[in-house]
Image: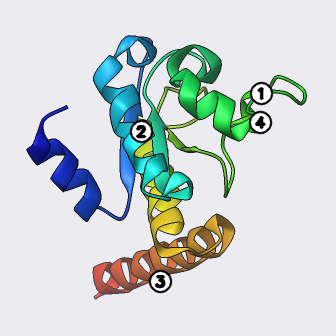
Amino acid sequence: MQDDAKDALRASRFLVVVCSRLTPGSERIVQEIDLFYQLGRSGHVLAVLTEGEPKDALPAILLERHKIGQSDGSDNDFVDDEGPLAADVRPHAGFSLTKIQRIARQRLTARILGVPFADLSRIDARSRRRKSRLVTRRRRF
């Protein structure tokens, strides 16, 4: 890994890793995650899943350090307020791309700010309802 990449990682508070089926095979990504762990920031590595299943797309270093996927094997084992998989942007039945992206942004933002996702989601929903009511009122006049 180049010195400028190491310097950037040392200066960073969080490392966001975009994960696909190709991610586990990337030695550079593994080195970056390992350096972040060595810096004592293991809780600040946030993975965003773009394709594939978590156990096939997350680098082994993340799976091993966080003991992921050892309960019932569902995707719910992977996305939570503490594990490395902070967001999942794969298509989901019944969810628009806009909603999937909004939830992913909320999950990342919650983790970076250190607040529960549910609280941030509730605040966002309240804000969207308020904006919707304002737009509706303006249209009446």
Q: Quarter holding the C terminus?
A: bottom left
Cα–Cα span, label 2 and label 3:
40 Å
Q: Residue at x 60, y 26 (%)?
A: 93
Task: Report the residue marked by disc 3.
Answer: 130
Inspect the image, locate mark 4, and give the three-letter code of the amino acid beneath it.
Asp
Between marks 3 and 1 in the image, the one whose residue lies nearer the viewer: 1
**Which of the 4 quarters of the picture holds residue 98?**
top left
Between marks 1 and 2 in the image, the one whose residue lies nearer the viewer: 2
Q: Are marks 1 and 2 in contact (CB under 8 Å)?
A: no
Cα–Cα span, label 4 and label 3:
33 Å
**Pointer 4 or 1: first along the chain:** 1
Task: Please state the horizontal and vertical placement of residue 79, each as a whole percent of the image.
Answer: 66, 43
**Pointer 4 or 3: first along the chain:** 4
Mark 1 closeness class: few <14, some 14–19, many ≥20 residues within 10 Å: some
Task: Report the residue marked by disc 2.
Answer: 33
**Pointer 1 or 2: first along the chain:** 2
Mark 4 closeness class: few <14, some 14–19, many ≥20 residues within 10 Å: some
Q: Are marks 4 and 1 in contact (CB under 8 Å)?
A: yes
**Pointer 2 or 3: first along the chain:** 2
Determine whether the residue tagged by mark 4 lies in a helix, strand or loop: helix
Inspect the image, locate mark 1, and give the three-letter code of the amino acid beneath it.
Gly
Task: Report the residue marked by disc 4.
Answer: 77
Task: Report the residue marked by disc 1.
Answer: 69
Q: Are marks 4 and 3 in contact (CB under 8 Å)?
A: no
